[in-house]
Amino acid sequence: MPVATDELHTAFFIPDTDFGTHALDGQGSTTAAALTATAPHSNERHSDELRAGELRADESRANALQSNELLSQVAASPEPAPSTVESQVAEAGEFITLTSRPDATELPLSPLAPASPASATAENIETLTPTEAYDAAHPGNEGSRWPALAATIVLTLALGAQALVGWRDDIAARLPPLAPMLSQVLAPLGWSVASPRHRAALSIESFELRASSTAGEFELSALLSNRAAYPVALPALELTLKDSADGVMLRKVLTAEEYAGSPQSATSSLPGRSERAVRVRMALNGPAPAGYSADLFYP
Protein backbone atom coordinates (compact mmCIF):
# COMPACT_ATOMS: atom_id res chain seq x y z
CA MET A 1 0.00 0.00 0.00
CA PRO A 2 1.59 3.35 -0.96
CA VAL A 3 2.65 5.60 1.87
CA ALA A 4 1.85 9.28 1.72
CA THR A 5 4.74 11.69 1.45
CA ASP A 6 3.80 13.63 4.56
CA GLU A 7 3.93 10.40 6.60
CA LEU A 8 7.64 9.72 5.70
CA HIS A 9 10.13 11.05 8.21
CA THR A 10 13.91 10.74 8.38
CA ALA A 11 14.94 8.29 11.07
CA PHE A 12 18.26 8.08 12.93
CA PHE A 13 19.34 4.69 14.37
CA ILE A 14 21.77 4.10 17.13
CA PRO A 15 23.10 0.50 17.02
CA ASP A 16 23.11 -1.31 20.31
CA THR A 17 24.85 -4.44 21.40
CA ASP A 18 21.72 -6.47 20.69
CA PHE A 19 21.31 -4.64 17.40
CA GLY A 20 18.18 -2.85 18.66
CA THR A 21 17.24 0.66 17.52
CA HIS A 22 15.61 3.75 18.99
CA ALA A 23 13.09 5.24 16.59
CA LEU A 24 12.40 8.94 16.58
CA ASP A 25 9.10 8.75 14.72
CA GLY A 26 5.98 6.60 14.29
CA GLN A 27 7.64 4.31 11.66
CA GLY A 28 10.64 3.38 13.82
CA SER A 29 9.25 0.08 14.98
CA THR A 30 9.14 -1.35 11.42
CA THR A 31 12.72 -0.27 10.57
CA ALA A 32 14.10 -1.60 13.85
CA ALA A 33 12.58 -4.99 13.16
CA ALA A 34 14.33 -5.13 9.75
CA LEU A 35 17.75 -4.30 11.21
CA THR A 36 17.25 -6.83 13.96
CA ALA A 37 16.70 -9.52 11.26
CA THR A 38 20.08 -8.73 9.51
CA ALA A 39 22.11 -8.75 12.72
CA PRO A 40 22.67 -12.55 12.81
CA HIS A 41 24.32 -12.49 9.34
CA SER A 42 26.85 -9.89 10.49
CA ASN A 43 27.69 -12.02 13.53
CA GLU A 44 28.31 -15.06 11.30
CA ARG A 45 30.75 -13.18 9.04
CA HIS A 46 32.59 -11.85 12.05
CA SER A 47 32.89 -15.38 13.48
CA ASP A 48 34.23 -16.73 10.12
CA GLU A 49 36.95 -14.10 9.98
CA LEU A 50 38.03 -14.90 13.54
CA ARG A 51 38.27 -18.62 12.75
CA ALA A 52 40.32 -17.95 9.56
CA GLY A 53 42.76 -15.80 11.51
CA GLU A 54 43.16 -18.49 14.14
CA LEU A 55 43.90 -21.12 11.43
CA ARG A 56 46.61 -18.95 9.84
CA ALA A 57 48.19 -18.39 13.23
CA ASP A 58 48.20 -22.14 13.87
CA GLU A 59 49.90 -22.82 10.51
CA SER A 60 52.58 -20.20 11.22
CA ARG A 61 53.33 -21.76 14.60
CA ALA A 62 53.52 -25.25 13.03
CA ASN A 63 55.98 -24.05 10.34
CA ALA A 64 58.14 -22.35 12.98
CA LEU A 65 58.25 -25.53 15.04
CA GLN A 66 59.22 -27.64 12.03
CA SER A 67 62.03 -25.22 11.08
CA ASN A 68 63.38 -25.32 14.65
CA GLU A 69 63.39 -29.11 14.61
CA LEU A 70 65.36 -29.19 11.32
CA LEU A 71 67.91 -26.73 12.62
CA SER A 72 68.31 -28.79 15.78
CA GLN A 73 68.92 -31.98 13.75
CA VAL A 74 71.57 -30.29 11.56
CA ALA A 75 73.35 -28.85 14.59
CA ALA A 76 73.30 -32.23 16.39
CA SER A 77 74.81 -34.24 13.46
CA PRO A 78 78.64 -34.78 13.93
CA GLU A 79 79.60 -34.71 10.21
CA PRO A 80 77.75 -34.14 6.98
CA ALA A 81 76.62 -37.16 5.03
CA PRO A 82 78.22 -37.80 1.66
CA SER A 83 76.44 -35.79 -0.98
CA THR A 84 75.95 -36.83 -4.56
CA VAL A 85 75.78 -34.10 -7.16
CA GLU A 86 74.31 -35.26 -10.38
CA SER A 87 74.96 -32.95 -13.25
CA GLN A 88 74.31 -33.80 -16.83
CA VAL A 89 77.40 -32.84 -18.73
CA ALA A 90 77.18 -32.98 -22.51
CA GLU A 91 80.45 -34.47 -23.63
CA ALA A 92 80.80 -36.29 -26.95
CA GLY A 93 77.03 -36.63 -27.13
CA GLU A 94 76.78 -38.56 -23.80
CA PHE A 95 75.63 -37.68 -20.26
CA ILE A 96 77.75 -38.58 -17.21
CA THR A 97 77.08 -38.40 -13.44
CA LEU A 98 79.60 -36.76 -11.11
CA THR A 99 79.71 -38.05 -7.52
CA SER A 100 81.58 -36.17 -4.77
CA ARG A 101 82.76 -38.07 -1.71
CA PRO A 102 84.30 -36.62 1.47
CA ASP A 103 87.13 -39.16 1.46
CA ALA A 104 88.02 -38.63 -2.20
CA THR A 105 91.57 -37.49 -3.00
CA GLU A 106 92.09 -34.77 -5.59
CA LEU A 107 94.51 -35.79 -8.34
CA PRO A 108 96.56 -33.25 -10.32
CA LEU A 109 95.40 -32.74 -13.90
CA SER A 110 97.96 -32.94 -16.68
CA PRO A 111 97.44 -31.20 -20.04
CA LEU A 112 96.46 -33.44 -22.93
CA ALA A 113 99.09 -33.95 -25.61
CA PRO A 114 98.07 -32.80 -29.11
CA ALA A 115 97.01 -35.60 -31.40
CA SER A 116 99.53 -36.51 -34.07
CA PRO A 117 98.48 -36.71 -37.74
CA ALA A 118 99.07 -40.44 -37.71
CA SER A 119 96.45 -40.93 -34.98
CA ALA A 120 93.85 -38.69 -36.60
CA THR A 121 90.32 -40.02 -36.55
CA ALA A 122 87.21 -39.35 -38.60
CA GLU A 123 86.29 -36.41 -36.34
CA ASN A 124 89.38 -34.31 -37.12
CA ILE A 125 90.32 -35.69 -40.55
CA GLU A 126 88.57 -32.73 -42.22
CA THR A 127 90.94 -30.24 -40.56
CA LEU A 128 94.10 -31.87 -41.95
CA THR A 129 95.96 -30.89 -45.07
CA PRO A 130 96.00 -33.38 -47.99
CA THR A 131 99.50 -34.49 -47.06
CA GLU A 132 98.58 -35.05 -43.40
CA ALA A 133 95.40 -36.86 -44.44
CA TYR A 134 97.42 -39.22 -46.63
CA ASP A 135 99.86 -39.90 -43.78
CA ALA A 136 96.95 -40.52 -41.39
CA ALA A 137 95.36 -43.02 -43.78
CA HIS A 138 98.70 -44.76 -44.42
CA PRO A 139 100.66 -44.76 -41.15
CA GLY A 140 104.32 -45.61 -41.58
CA ASN A 141 104.33 -44.78 -45.30
CA GLU A 142 105.07 -41.07 -45.12
CA GLY A 143 107.78 -41.32 -47.77
CA SER A 144 105.67 -43.22 -50.31
CA ARG A 145 103.88 -40.08 -51.46
CA TRP A 146 106.93 -38.67 -53.24
CA PRO A 147 106.78 -41.10 -56.19
CA ALA A 148 103.13 -40.23 -56.69
CA LEU A 149 103.95 -36.52 -56.54
CA ALA A 150 106.74 -36.93 -59.08
CA ALA A 151 104.42 -38.87 -61.41
CA THR A 152 101.82 -36.10 -61.11
CA ILE A 153 104.39 -33.45 -62.07
CA VAL A 154 105.57 -35.48 -65.08
CA LEU A 155 102.02 -36.05 -66.32
CA THR A 156 101.20 -32.35 -65.91
CA LEU A 157 104.23 -31.34 -67.96
CA ALA A 158 103.34 -33.91 -70.64
CA LEU A 159 99.79 -32.57 -70.92
CA GLY A 160 101.12 -29.00 -71.13
CA ALA A 161 103.51 -29.96 -73.95
CA GLN A 162 100.72 -31.72 -75.83
CA ALA A 163 98.49 -28.66 -75.53
CA LEU A 164 101.34 -26.41 -76.69
CA VAL A 165 101.88 -28.53 -79.81
CA GLY A 166 98.20 -28.87 -80.62
CA TRP A 167 97.42 -25.16 -80.18
CA ARG A 168 100.70 -23.78 -81.53
CA ASP A 169 99.07 -21.98 -84.48
CA ASP A 170 96.44 -20.30 -82.28
CA ILE A 171 99.03 -19.33 -79.66
CA ALA A 172 101.30 -17.78 -82.32
CA ALA A 173 98.37 -15.91 -83.92
CA ARG A 174 97.06 -14.43 -80.66
CA LEU A 175 100.55 -13.83 -79.18
CA PRO A 176 102.77 -12.80 -82.12
CA PRO A 177 105.92 -12.25 -79.97
CA LEU A 178 105.91 -15.99 -79.12
CA ALA A 179 105.74 -17.13 -82.75
CA PRO A 180 109.53 -17.07 -83.44
CA MET A 181 110.31 -18.93 -80.23
CA LEU A 182 107.72 -21.61 -80.96
CA SER A 183 109.13 -22.06 -84.46
CA GLN A 184 112.65 -22.57 -83.12
CA VAL A 185 111.54 -25.02 -80.44
CA LEU A 186 109.26 -27.12 -82.65
CA ALA A 187 111.31 -27.10 -85.89
CA PRO A 188 113.74 -29.84 -84.72
CA LEU A 189 110.74 -32.02 -83.92
CA GLY A 190 109.31 -31.64 -87.43
CA TRP A 191 106.49 -29.24 -86.57
CA SER A 192 105.97 -25.83 -88.12
CA VAL A 193 103.97 -22.80 -87.01
CA ALA A 194 101.41 -21.40 -89.47
CA SER A 195 98.31 -19.23 -89.39
CA PRO A 196 95.27 -20.91 -87.80
CA ARG A 197 92.43 -22.26 -89.92
CA HIS A 198 89.24 -20.66 -88.63
CA ARG A 199 86.45 -20.98 -91.17
CA ALA A 200 83.96 -19.21 -88.91
CA ALA A 201 86.01 -16.00 -89.14
CA LEU A 202 85.78 -15.85 -92.99
CA SER A 203 83.00 -14.75 -95.30
CA ILE A 204 82.42 -13.88 -98.99
CA GLU A 205 81.33 -10.26 -99.20
CA SER A 206 80.79 -10.28 -102.98
CA PHE A 207 81.00 -12.83 -105.82
CA GLU A 208 80.55 -12.55 -109.57
CA LEU A 209 81.02 -14.86 -112.56
CA ARG A 210 80.81 -13.36 -116.06
CA ALA A 211 81.84 -14.40 -119.55
CA SER A 212 85.04 -12.88 -120.90
CA SER A 213 85.77 -11.63 -124.42
CA THR A 214 87.37 -14.97 -125.25
CA ALA A 215 84.94 -17.75 -126.15
CA GLY A 216 84.67 -20.49 -123.54
CA GLU A 217 86.34 -18.41 -120.80
CA PHE A 218 84.82 -16.90 -117.68
CA GLU A 219 86.14 -14.41 -115.17
CA LEU A 220 85.52 -14.95 -111.44
CA SER A 221 85.63 -12.02 -109.01
CA ALA A 222 85.23 -12.39 -105.24
CA LEU A 223 85.93 -10.38 -102.09
CA LEU A 224 87.03 -12.38 -99.02
CA SER A 225 86.75 -10.91 -95.51
CA ASN A 226 88.33 -11.89 -92.17
CA ARG A 227 86.22 -10.77 -89.17
CA ALA A 228 88.68 -12.06 -86.53
CA ALA A 229 91.19 -9.81 -84.78
CA TYR A 230 94.09 -12.14 -85.68
CA PRO A 231 95.35 -13.46 -89.05
CA VAL A 232 93.96 -16.68 -90.51
CA ALA A 233 95.15 -18.94 -93.31
CA LEU A 234 93.78 -18.45 -96.83
CA PRO A 235 90.98 -20.95 -97.57
CA ALA A 236 90.07 -22.85 -100.70
CA LEU A 237 87.15 -21.64 -102.84
CA GLU A 238 84.53 -24.05 -104.20
CA LEU A 239 82.61 -22.92 -107.31
CA THR A 240 79.38 -24.69 -108.31
CA LEU A 241 77.78 -24.06 -111.76
CA LYS A 242 74.06 -24.78 -112.20
CA ASP A 243 71.70 -25.16 -115.16
CA SER A 244 68.26 -23.68 -115.65
CA ALA A 245 66.65 -26.49 -113.61
CA ASP A 246 68.98 -25.66 -110.64
CA GLY A 247 70.94 -28.85 -111.30
CA VAL A 248 74.69 -29.05 -110.80
CA MET A 249 76.57 -28.75 -114.10
CA LEU A 250 80.09 -28.45 -112.73
CA ARG A 251 81.81 -28.19 -109.39
CA LYS A 252 85.33 -26.78 -109.33
CA VAL A 253 87.71 -26.14 -106.40
CA LEU A 254 90.19 -23.29 -106.49
CA THR A 255 93.03 -23.66 -103.99
CA ALA A 256 94.88 -20.73 -102.43
CA GLU A 257 97.82 -21.30 -104.85
CA GLU A 258 95.46 -20.98 -107.84
CA TYR A 259 93.75 -17.71 -106.91
CA ALA A 260 96.64 -16.14 -104.94
CA GLY A 261 98.92 -16.09 -107.98
CA SER A 262 102.02 -17.76 -106.46
CA PRO A 263 102.94 -20.40 -103.90
CA GLN A 264 104.51 -17.74 -101.72
CA SER A 265 101.29 -15.75 -101.66
CA ALA A 266 99.31 -18.91 -100.94
CA THR A 267 101.23 -19.49 -97.71
CA SER A 268 100.52 -15.95 -96.55
CA SER A 269 97.57 -15.28 -94.29
CA LEU A 270 94.63 -12.94 -94.36
CA PRO A 271 95.30 -10.29 -91.68
CA GLY A 272 92.79 -9.67 -88.94
CA ARG A 273 89.77 -7.49 -89.78
CA SER A 274 90.81 -7.14 -93.42
CA GLU A 275 89.57 -8.00 -96.91
CA ARG A 276 91.19 -9.50 -100.00
CA ALA A 277 90.03 -9.35 -103.62
CA VAL A 278 90.22 -12.52 -105.74
CA ARG A 279 90.20 -12.47 -109.55
CA VAL A 280 90.59 -15.67 -111.62
CA ARG A 281 90.14 -16.56 -115.32
CA MET A 282 89.08 -20.09 -116.17
CA ALA A 283 87.93 -22.02 -119.22
CA LEU A 284 84.60 -23.85 -119.20
CA ASN A 285 83.53 -26.27 -121.92
CA GLY A 286 79.88 -26.77 -122.72
CA PRO A 287 76.86 -24.55 -122.47
CA ALA A 288 76.90 -21.41 -120.38
CA PRO A 289 75.70 -21.90 -116.81
CA ALA A 290 72.38 -20.41 -115.76
CA GLY A 291 73.45 -19.94 -112.11
CA TYR A 292 76.33 -20.43 -109.73
CA SER A 293 77.28 -20.45 -106.05
CA ALA A 294 80.53 -20.25 -104.09
CA ASP A 295 81.75 -21.37 -100.69
CA LEU A 296 84.95 -21.33 -98.60
CA PHE A 297 86.53 -24.30 -96.82
CA TYR A 298 89.86 -25.72 -95.65
CA PRO A 299 90.90 -28.95 -97.40
Image (spheres, rainbow, N blue to C red):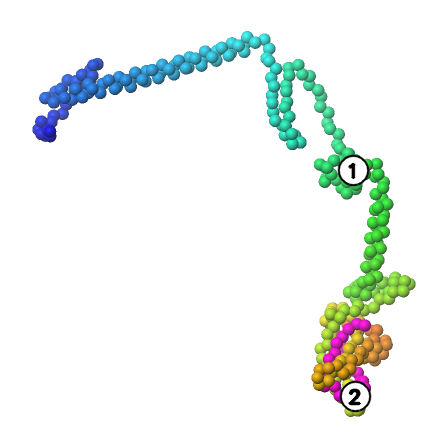
Q: Amino acid at mark 2?
A: Gly
* Depth order, front residue of 13/90: 90
Q: Position of residue 63 (x, y in %)?
A: 44, 14
> In this view of the protein, can residue 231 be seen by the observer?
no
Question: Which quadrant would residue 95 be assigned to in this image?
Answer: top right
**Would you say residue 108 is visible in this rendering?**
yes
Stretch in magenta: 275-299
> Residue 151: image x %, image y %?
85, 49
Residue 67 position within the rendered picture, expressed as x and y whole percent measured from the top left? 48, 13
Left or right: where 55 falls relative to 88: left
Residue at x 88% of width, y 63% of height: 186
Q: Mark 1 = which residue?
A: 136
Image quarter (top left, top right, bottom left or bottom right) of the N terminus: top left
Q: Main secondary structure of the magenta part?
A: strand
Q: Name the residue at 60% across, 21% down.
A: 85
Q: Quadrant of residue 61?
A: top left
Pointer 2: residues within 10 angstroms few (<14), some, or many (20+)? Answer: few
Please check the rendered image and state whether residue 289 is part of the magenta-colored stretch, yes or no.
Answer: yes
Left or right: 84 in relation to 254? left
In this rendering, is residue 88 above or below 220? above
Q: Position of residue 156 (x, y in %)?
A: 82, 53
Given the image, on which type of amino acid does mark 1 rest?
Answer: Ala
Q: Secondary structure at mark 2?
A: loop
In the rendered image, residue 65 lying in the magenta stretch gets the answer no
Q: Quarter of the image containing the C terminus?
A: bottom right
- Residue 216 is marked as none
Separation of disc 1 and disc 2 at Cα? 84 Å
Q: Residue furthest right?
A: 188
First-in-chain label (1 vs 2): 1
Q: Is residue 90 left or right of residue 189?
A: left
Q: Is residue 106 above or below residue 152?
A: above
Residue 286 shows which numbered tag? 2
